[in-house]
Image: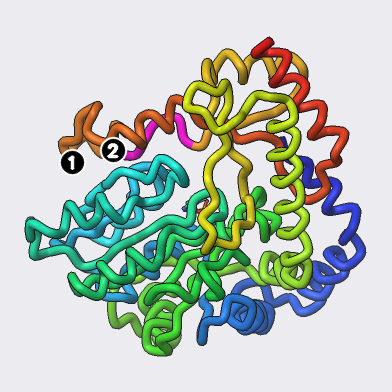
Amino acid sequence: MLDLSRQFAQIRDEVLAAIERVCASQHFILGAEVEALDREVAVFVGAAEAVGCASGTDALWLALLAVGVQPGDSVITTAFSFFASASAIVRAGARPVLLDVDPHTLNLDPAQVEAHLRPGKSTQLRALLPVHLYGQCADMDALEKLAREFELTIVEDAAQAIGASWHDRRAGSLGAAAAFSFYPTKNLSAYGDAGLVTTNDPEFAAHMRRLRTHGSPRRYLHEEFGWNCRLDAIQAAVLRVKLPYVEKWNQQRRDRAATYDRLFTQSGLTSGRANDPIRPLVTSPHAHHVYHQYVIRAQRRDDLRQFLADRKIGTEVYYPIPIHLQPAFAYLGYREGDLPESERAAREVLALPMFPELTEDEQQWVVENVADFYS
Ligand SMILES: Cc1ncc(COP(=O)(O)O)c(C=O)c1O
């Protein structure tokens, strides 16, 4: 599914030198490495500021608080994402409003958002939290238009989308604030947990820097309740080594995705018909997709997954249970059938091996085995 050792082999000397540098400095939390990473990621993303923190989950929480989400507010997000997209809203004291996805991209469907907003159901809606799922930006033209009309602040969940863009604007510069995850499997990944928020608002950034150190503007003075979600210097140093490679690695992912598309078409498994055994997701012409995952919809998905596992081909299901059906969210009162596209996606999606160093032979092997399963 993912072989990180191939990446490590390319950058081993640089990474070890960076870790050595931190050890020599004996400065392990925040400090010069984190400040440098913040500057470098802000430039990469095209945002004025970046604030490193301990994880993507913390980044979402910091971003929501910084834009002013507070207890009693509601925040719209997608039902088809990792749990943290919605649980961070709860951590900020607010209520998630979970809406369905566009079946072509599996990103938050602006038509569903509009249908929710138009009747004027809630006065407490504060923010819109689109997730750029699998590395493809949500439809930001439509979502920005709705956000403007209904006075909602956009917080991007860009955890899977470093380097992705919508038209010519990068994920991380499309809303009031954006959360990134550098979890080890991500396109830009740390050697442990790490995350970061980007924003164009210097006050939001300053607030997040206080929040990540217990609401503290200076040592032992606490003006509000933040939390400890600081970024380690070693993680920042590793990320600084990797950041200059991200564009190349993302391009390699895009090339691998094009290869899968070609091989699946050649195999006859997919021909654009609704009853094809497998159907790739759709990429919007406005999106520069960075393929954090290459995901297909598959008939008899679980049997296919077992068949591939028996042949030592790793796959994953992101995500088998949509957020509105997670037990922790039972209190929101959603029922099975409420968000049918998310539920169907949870039954059908399968992520195939995808990383920059994947070889064409390996991809061929994956596709041959998928074809064997359906033959
Ligand atoms: C869409 C999405 N949001 C949020 C997160 C949370 O990031 P982290 O695992 O770094 O806390 C992830 C990571 O798994 C994610 O994929």
Callout 1: SS: helix
Callout 2: SS: helix
Please tell me whether the stretch drawn in magenta is mainly helix, strand or loop.
loop
Residue drawn where x is 83% and y is 53% of the image? 7
Distance CA(mark 2)–CA(mark 1) = 8 Å
Task: Name the kind of residue labelled 2 in the image.
Answer: His
Residue drawn where x is 68% and y is 24% of the image? 268
**Residue matched to label 2:** 324
Snapshot colouring: rainbow
Q: Is mark 2 within 8 Å of ligand 1?
A: no
Start-end of magenta stretch: 319-326
State the residue in front, 93 or 297. Answer: 297
Residue drawn where x is 87% and y is 61% of the image? 11
Q: Viewed as shown, does residue 347 lie left or right of 33?
A: left
Q: Is residue 186 above or below residue 280?
A: below
Q: Is mark 1 within 8 Å of ligand 1?
A: no
Disc 2 to disc 1: CB gap under 8 Å? yes
Magenta segment: does it hold 320? yes
State the residue in front, 85 or 230. Answer: 85
Image quadrant assignment for residue 247? bottom right
- Residue 332's mark? 1
